Image: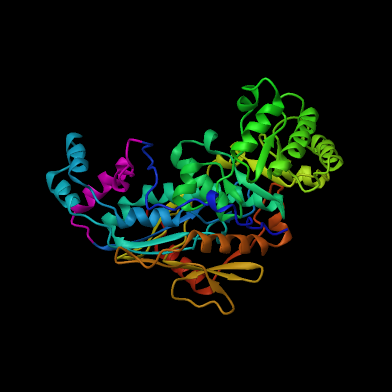
């Protein structure tokens, strides 16, 4: 039941990567500068640090406090985007002018921001790796002002894309050896989200996306058929099929449910046999409404009786992992799925409780002791063992374990850039390796994968708590 990469598409359908995508501001408005993707209190704290002469280094960790009941695991994503932002992180003249116009920041602080760059070190879990609650996905060590100001950027990039990738992973698990494609762009929460959803789906083994911008930026194969409006624009459904097939004769896919699905299937057979003399071959038909399981069986019989046993059946129409799993469990002869709204909005779990917390500064390890929000002190590593994970101090070794956090930036410079194909390979392999309990699509009332604390970290926790009876770091 491994999510399988798609077969190579026709050369004319292979998208070409480009270096830049439409930014969060939307088309024609430009990308939002990463340095301004920060909450006001990050800036006010940074100004107060500077006014008080606090310049020391600090370490923060980004993690998800708890998994939604609908998630048994998470799939790490968003790191490439996050690191790109840190590498270009700066306040330009217009940014400084805007902040000055607020009338709340000292001139000395604004002058400091003018030349500020991110110079810190970043350790992170690679994209496509399975992770769990409480495990650091990103660890930042930098001068305190820098480390503080990048909080919102990192949380926005990592949490939102991890949310989408985790949903796409469930769709991939439900599809098993059947293909699926991302159809979500028109329902996603903005252009930025649509790009991230297409990338996340591809990471998890999708065969392609309908979003042309994502195809261009990421090199994801593009896929698409026709809308009902195209069929409705012709007096005869068969004329619509003929016109489309002759215009796009390679890999023809016909949408057959505009009027009567079964009659549409018979029309597809008629047109396919007619156009075979012209060298045009029907590749698939698509169902987008009705009882998909029952219709797929009847359509399959019509296609087979018409000598089109090799024509595939594609299904779409507000699908999610549960509907896909139910269709396949019921024996529906559906070969591929187009998944849209539910995937691109992660509709059943649209948020992750990701946080970014101080764990160490010049005074030593820090903890937060607020009820229900207690944190673990010190920079940490995550080790994956057979059947469990272990959280350790960053300098500890856990025999037999594989460390998940790796250097991603040193001195504000990226250590390298992973290809999306490599990330996809990792994600598909990680999903294939999941134990049965984590592959289930049912809700989970409690964590199903143990995340333990190492002896060294346990001792540090005890020592820090003993020394801070009234509280800890913030």
Quarter of the figure with residue 140: bottom left
Q: Position of residue 285 (x, y in %)?
A: 72, 39
Residue 45 on the magenta segment: yes
Q: Is residue 188 above or below residue 236?
A: below
Q: Residue furthest front?
A: 277
Q: Residue at x 66, y 56 (%)?
A: 3
Q: Is residue 20 left or right of residue 450?
A: left
Residue 474 on the magenta segment: no
Total of numbered circles in the picture? 0
Q: Residue at x 53, y 42 (%)?
A: 351
Q: Position of residue 382 (x, y in %)?
A: 52, 67
Q: Is residue 260 above or below residue 110?
A: above
Query: In terms of depth relative to the viewer, which is nearer, 252 or 342?
Result: 252
Q: Position of residue 383 (x, y in %)?
A: 54, 70
Q: Residue at x 19, y 40 (%)?
A: 94
Quarter of the figure with residue 142: bottom left
Residue 471 visible (yes or no): no
Q: Residue furthest top?
A: 235
Residue 380 visible (yes or no): yes
Query: In terms of depth relative to the viewer, which is nearer, 290 or 95?
Result: 290
The range drawn in magenta is 28-55
Q: Which quadrant would the N terminus be assigned to in this image?
A: bottom right
């Amino acid at each position: 039941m491994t999510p399988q990469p798609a077969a190579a598409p026709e050369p004319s359908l292979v998208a070409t990567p480009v270096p830049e995508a439409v930014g969060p501001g939307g088309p024609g408005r430009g990308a939002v500068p990463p340095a301004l993707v920060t909450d006001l209190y990050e800036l006010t704290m940074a100004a107060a640090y500077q006014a008080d002469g606090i310049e020391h280094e600090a370490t923060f960790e980004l993690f998800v406090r708890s998994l939604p009941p609908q998630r048994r695991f998470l799939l790490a994503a968003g790191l490439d985007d996050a690191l790109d932002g840190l590498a270009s992180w700066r306040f330009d003249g217009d940014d400084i002018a805007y902040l000055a116009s607020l009338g709340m920041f000292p001139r000395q602080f604004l002058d400091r921001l003018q030349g500020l760059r991110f110079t810190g070190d970043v350790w992170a879990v690679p994209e496509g790796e399975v992770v769990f609650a409480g495990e650091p996905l990103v660890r930042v060590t930098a001068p305190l002002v820098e480390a503080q100001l990048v909080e919102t950027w990192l949380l926005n990039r990592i949490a939102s894309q991890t949310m989408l990738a985790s949903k796409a992973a469930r769709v991939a698990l439900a599809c098993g050896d059947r293909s699926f494609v991302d159809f979500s762009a028109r329902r996603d929460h903005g252009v930025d989200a649509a790009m991230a959803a297409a990338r996340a789906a591809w990471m998890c083994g999708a065969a392609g996306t309908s979003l042309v911008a994502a195809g261009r930026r990421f090199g994801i194969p593009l896929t698409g058929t026709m809308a009902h409006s195209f069929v409705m624009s012709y007096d005869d459904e068969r004329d619509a099929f003929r016109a489309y097939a002759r215009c796009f004769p390679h890999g023809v896919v016909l949408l057959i449910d505009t009027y009567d699905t079964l009659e549409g299937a018979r029309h597809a057979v008629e047109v396919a046999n007619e156009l075979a003399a012209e060298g045009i071959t029907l590749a698939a038909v698509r169902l987008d409404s009705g009882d998909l399981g029952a219709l797929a069986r009847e359509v399959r019989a019509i296609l087979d009786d018409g000598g089109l046993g090799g024509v595939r059946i594609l299904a779409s129409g507000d699908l999610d992992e549960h509907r896909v799993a139910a269709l396949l469990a019921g024996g529906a002869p559906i070969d591929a799925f187009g998944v849209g709204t539910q995937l691109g909005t992660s509709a059943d779990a649209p948020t992750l409780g990701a946080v970014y917390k101080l764990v160490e500064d010049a005074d030593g390890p820090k903890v937060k002791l607020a009820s229900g929000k207690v944190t673990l002190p010190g920079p940490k590593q995550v080790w994956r063992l057979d059947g469990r994970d272990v959280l350790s101090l960053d300098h500890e070794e856990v025999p037999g374990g594989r460390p998940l956090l790796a250097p991603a930036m040193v001195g504000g410079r990226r250590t390298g850039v992973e290809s999306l194909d490599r990330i996809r390979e990792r994600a598909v392999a990680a999903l294939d390796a999941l134990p049965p309990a984590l592959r289930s699509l049912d809700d989970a009332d409690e964590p199903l994968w143990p995340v333990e604390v190492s002896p060294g970290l346990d001792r540090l926790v005890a020592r820090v708590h003993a020394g801070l009876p009234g509280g800890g770091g913030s």
